[in-house]
Image: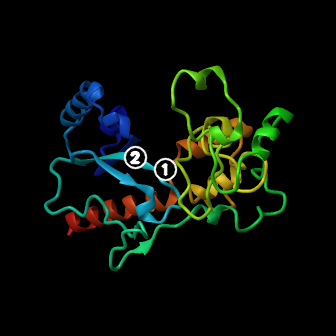
Amino acid sequence: FDFVRALRPTAFLVENVVGLLWPRHKHHLEKFYAEAASAGYDVCPPVVLNACDYGVPQRRKRVFILGWKDKMPCNPTWPPAPTHCNPASPIPGLASWHTAAEAFLHPAPQGDANDVHMNHGEALLKVFRSTPPNGGSRKDSCRVLPCHENHDGHKDVYGRIDPSKPAPTMTTACINPSKGRFLHPTEHHGITVRQAARLQTFPDDFIFTGGLMSAARQVGNAVPIRLGEAVLRSILSMITDSRR
């Protein structure tokens, strides 16, 4: 809100994980609303948007909170209407969700600095070879660690991405198969930074720098490009209408 007070934008938009709405974080949201009001901004209730619904080949739910200087416009075009839907429940006029195949159909550009994946040891390569194509999980990998023995969680670790479906959420560890379903659909290694970036709908000419782990964090923390375009078009439309 230091930036909001200094820049006085017509609107601001905040994105965060869905856990922001958990009851135990209620006091943080209340403080957020108080800060917005003291800065002279009206705030819409939080909305949860799934990137799948806006043409992103990834299941990714995030919270968005829109703030507006003075008073929110009447009948705002917020949140943006979905452009895509689950093919299992088709909606007239909407395209089907994009699938993870987008990230793997074409090789990376020649000399692409982000066409890199983690180097895995022989023990993990053995795990990956035992994981069936387009799916699988920790149970298929035959790799049981102490952290796996005491609970039934982390089922997706060492699992392969299924290219016939939207990809799982790209996290800051999206190139590490031990952190989720981030194994290449058919090859025996984690996905590359470029493949993760494609699942976030970054163009291939966008280069992430700072090393492999830093690049993965940048990809995982980003708002998918197509989703960003959708929310910004919605806000731009509101700004244009309010100025008329």
Whether residue 106 is situated above or below residue 117 in the rendered picture: below
- On residue 62, the disc is 2
Looking at numbered disc 2 in the image, what kind of residue is underneath it? Arg
Q: Please identify the quadrant where the C terminus is shown.
A: bottom left
Tags 1 and 2 in contact by the CB under 8 Å rule? yes
Amino acid marked by disc 1: Val
Instruction: Please report whichever mark, 1 or 2, sits nearer to the chain's N-terminal start.
Output: 2
Q: Using the rendered view, name the quadrant where residue 205 is placed.
A: bottom right
Residue at 18%, 36% in the rendered image: 37
Bin the neighbour count of mark 2 within 10 Å (Cα to Cα): few under 14, some 14-19, many 20 and up.
some
Q: Is residue 131 above or below residue 151?
A: below
Tag 1 residue: 223
Viewer-proximal residue among 54 and 120: 120
**Above or below for 142 versus 89:** above
Residue at left 71%, top 35%?
142
| Image spot of residue 126 (x, y percent) | 81, 39
- For residue 149, side relative to residue 243 (left or right): right
Q: Going by the image, does 58 lie left or right of 44?
A: right
How far apart are labels 1 and 2 at the CA level? 9 Å
Residue 207, given in percent of the width and then of the height, sits at: 70, 52
Numbered mark located on residue 5 in the image: none
Identify the secondary structure beneath mark 1.
loop
Q: Is disc 2 placed on a helix, strand or loop?
A: strand
* Visible residue check, residue 176: no
Residue at the (65%, 61%) spot, across then down: 103
Residue 136, image x, y percentages: 64, 48
